[in-house]
Image (cartoon, grey):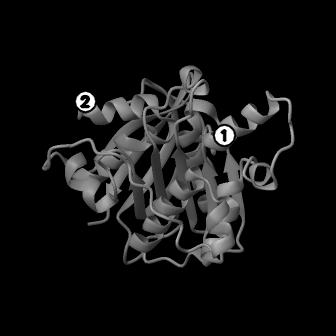
């Protein structure tokens, strides 16, 4: 294993949110990832964006709903004030349904896009809906790094924690493309993951997080069905980290980033 000369980034995890097949919340996913409950794949039930005003609630797409759901769960679990946190939203595809609908319109004779379709086409749309739902007026960053989108989001969020000294909410999310785009970019399911990262430990901190860049293969999840999610959904690349947190033990995992570099993540539990 070869480490680069980059400095190690450190922060504390105060809250977690997760949404995926058979992993509907962190409280439900934790015993599964710890190995004390058998994993049972279940359809993903996406919560309504109840925190949005009715006009925005009618316009919001599925991808943004997933992002809002895991963001709110992480904030609630951390007992944090969303208005005091910066935010990083990272997704390789964002609103895939909207992308497909726009492609269908542009391939037709009538190429007039609806204002809602255009509004939801920007990559930072989830960040915009989050600011409306939470009342947060802090900085928000939107990223895309293909299959390395989780790693890129984690690096950006931790950089803000270390350099700016601010608590930062990381939100990563994906929803499947409809056909024919699905054949070219086949996500098997919807998945979202959120972390509340802080510059200092607090009463609700779960673990210290240390991240470095390395040239080493990424770790897998010990549960075969969950590993299938990790290997095929960019936002699920963080599952080995969640498995280590669920087990409540000190350790290190390698998470996929951008070849040839990956992220070496060391976890030091607070309790």
The answer to whether residue 211 shows anywhere in this view is: yes
Neighbour tally class for label 2: few under 14, some 14-19, many 20 plus, Cα within 10 Å: few
Q: From the viewer's perspective, is residue 91 above or below residue 57?
A: above
Q: Quadrant of residue 152?
A: top right
Q: Quadrant of residue 133?
A: bottom right
Q: Is residue 44 left or right of residue 42?
A: right
Name the one closer to the observer, 146 or 61. 61
- Residue under label 2, please give it: 224
Secondary structure state at the residue bearing disc 1 = loop
Secondary structure state at the residue bearing disc 2 = helix
Q: Earlier in the sequence, mark 1 or mark 2?
A: 1
Residue 250, image x, y percentages: 28, 50
Evaluate if marks 1 and 2 touch, with contact meaning CB atoms under 8 Å apart.
no
Give me the residue at 63% from left, 59% from top.
60
Give me the residue at 67% from left, 43% from top.
98
Q: Residue furthest front?
A: 109
Name the one closer to the observer, 48 or 226. 48
Q: Is residue 124 left or right of residue 212?
A: right
């Amino acid at each position: 294993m070869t480490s680069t000369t980059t400095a190690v980034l450190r922060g504390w995890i105060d809250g977690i949110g997760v949404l995926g097949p058979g992993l509907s919340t962190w409280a439900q996913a934790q015993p599964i990832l710890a190995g004390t409950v058998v994993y049972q794949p279940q359809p993903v039930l996406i919560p309504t964006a109840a925190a949005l005003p009715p006009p925005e609630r009618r316009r919001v797409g599925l991808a943004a709903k997933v992002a809002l759901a895991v963001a709110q769960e992480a904030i609630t679990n951390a007992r944090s004030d969303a208005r005091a946190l910066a935010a990083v939203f990272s997704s390789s595809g964002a609103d895939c349904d909207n992308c497909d609908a726009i492609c269908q319109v542009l391939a037709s004779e009538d190429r007039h896009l609806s204002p809602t379709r255009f509004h939801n086409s920007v990559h930072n749309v989830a960040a915009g809906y989050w600011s409306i739902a939470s009342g947060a007026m802090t900085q928000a960053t939107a990223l895309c790094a293909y299959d390395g989108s989780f790693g890129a989001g984690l690096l950006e969020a931790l950089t803000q924690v270390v350099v700016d000294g601010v608590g930062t909410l990381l939100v990563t999310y994906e929803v499947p493309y409809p056909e024919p785009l699905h054949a070219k970019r086949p996500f098997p399911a919807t998945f979202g993951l959120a972390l509340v990262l802080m510059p200092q430990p607090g009463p609700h901190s779960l673990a210290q997080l240390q991240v470095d860049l390395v040239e080493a293969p990424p770790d897998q999840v010990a549960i075969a069905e969950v590993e299938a999610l990790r290997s095929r959904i960019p936002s699920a690349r963080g599952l080995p980290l969640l498995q280590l947190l669920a087990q409540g033990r000190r350790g290190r995992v390698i998470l996929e980033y951008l070849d040839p570099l990956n992220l070496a993540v060391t976890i030091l539990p607070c309790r």
